[in-house]
Image (cartoon, rainbow, N blue to C red):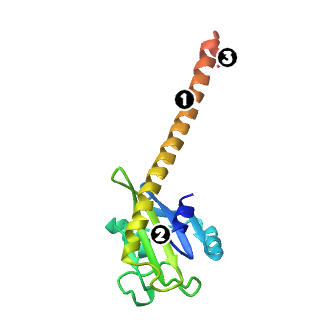
Amino acid sequence: SILEHVARPFQYNIAQINLWEEANQLLRPVRHAGDDDYEQELAQTSSYGYKAGERFSGWIITHRTHLLVSNIETATQVRPKLDRGEFPMQSYLGVPLFADQNFLGTLELVSYKANSYQPTDVMVLETIASQAAIAIKNAQSFAEQQQRVEELSGLAEITRAIESTTDPYEL
């Protein structure tokens, strides 16, 4: 999985993939790894998501570029969404996911240790994100094709039923 690949070069307490819902203008968490309490927090809030401009993830939506916060304690420009008492975040690194110039979502890392992520880490995570975006786009395309196949199969069954019936009242 994507997050397993991220664990090789990076140490994190929370890693998360969020996907963009164009219709709702919302970024929703779809995969995460790390802190089990965080996983439980997300499970309890099924409507959890990020709007443009809202906290770290929303900043990435708005600016469409990476966000590196080496020390959350001293950061003033943008703040995390979650309560830092429950999840003692100290460092954050997030990058956008793009496929064919289309914004798909974000790949984000959190560490409970300050200065865990450095500017040199951005390029590594962006490289992983570009490959992840291709995989995500391919999976989405495959799911869309499968849905179309199912719809066409249903139409074909209706057509066969109509063609096999000589009496219109049997329909």
- In this view of the protein, can residue 166 be seen by the observer? yes
Is 149 placed left or right of 131 in the picture?
right
Q: Is residue 86 above or below residue 66?
A: below
Q: CA distance from mark 1 to mark 2?
A: 38 Å
Q: Quadrant of residue 41?
A: bottom right
Dot 1 amino acid type = Leu
View extreme (bottom): residue:
74
Residue under label 2: 108
Residue under label 1: 152
Quarter of the rendering occupied by the C terminus: top right
Residue 170 - label: 3
Mark 1 vs mark 3: which is more N-terminal?
A: 1
At 51% from the left edge and 83% from the top edge, which residue is drawn?
A: 89
At 43% from the left edge and 86% from the top edge, which residue is drawn?
A: 71
Residue 119 percent across, percent down from the top left: 36, 76
Mark 3 vs mark 2: which is more N-terminal?
A: 2
Q: Is residue 152 above or below residue 85?
A: above
Dot 2 amino acid type = Glu
